[in-house]
Image (cartoon, helix red, strand yellow):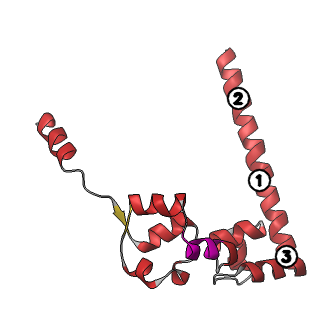
């Protein structure tokens, strides 16, 4: 039975496809800003790999200028997605808007960056503590 299943799956290699939203997320771009033919179709794993390896002009432009999805906005600002939400930023921002926010450096951004720095510091501390514990356990 298992041999039959293995044989069947190896003979019926289907092309793996994904929804445009998934592909946009993997490419780090805002779906609504992608070309209509990208938004309305499906993207195969092969097509995704090709887009990543040799991005067309529209993709390079989106990555450079935006609008960017919230995870990219958060990363560029050095804050969490929750921090963006707390600041009331729920829409995609362009690179220009992100740069303007950085230049303005409002109080909420300073606070969220400090929070994010603490979160990262704590993550490093916990990782080191775990490594020390593992080393101690290995010696026992």
Residue at (68% x, 82% y) in the render: 93
Please rate how many residues cluster around mark 2, counting C-alpha atoms within 10 Å: few if below 14, some from 14 to 19, many from 20: few
Asked if disc 2 and disc 3 are in contact, CB closer than 8 Å, the reply is no
Residue 61 on the magenta span: yes
Closer to viewer: mark 2 or mark 3: 3
Above or below 72: residue 39: below
99 relative to 36 in the view: left or right? right
Residue 105 can be seen in this image: no
Above or below 31: residue 55: above
Question: Who comes first in sequence, dot 2 or dot 3?
Answer: 3
Residue at (46% x, 67% y) in the render: 23
Measured from the top left, where is residue 116 in percent x and y?
Answer: 78, 62
Measured from the top left, where is residue 132 in percent x and y?
Answer: 74, 29
7 relative to 79 in the view: left or right? left
Q: Which residue is mark 1?
A: 120
In front of the other: 19 or 34: 34
Q: Name the disc covering residue 102, or none.
A: 3
Q: Which residue is mark 2?
A: 133
Q: Quadrant of the C terminus?
A: top right
- Spatial separation of the CA atoms under disc 2 and disc 3: 40 Å
Q: Please report the bounds of the magenta region as a residue range.
A: 56-63
29 relative to 109 in the view: left or right? left
């Amino acid at each position: 039975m298992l041999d039959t299943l293995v044989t069947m799956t190896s003979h019926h290699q289907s092309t793996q496809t994904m929804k445009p939203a998934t592909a946009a997320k993997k490419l780090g771009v805002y779906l609504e800003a992608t070309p209509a033919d990208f938004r309305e179709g499906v993207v195969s794993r092969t097509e995704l790999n090709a887009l990543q390896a040799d991005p067309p002009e529209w993709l390079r432009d989106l990555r450079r200028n935006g609008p960017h999805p919230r995870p990219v906005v958060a990363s560029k600002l050095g804050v969490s997605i929750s921090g963006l939400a707390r600041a009331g930023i729920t829409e995609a921002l362009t690179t220009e808007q992100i740069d303007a926010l950085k230049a303005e450096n409002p109080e909420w951004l300073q606070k969220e960056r400090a929070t994010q720095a603490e979160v990262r510091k704590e993550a490093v501390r916990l990782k080191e503590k775990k490594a020390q514990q593992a080393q101690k356990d290995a010696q026992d």
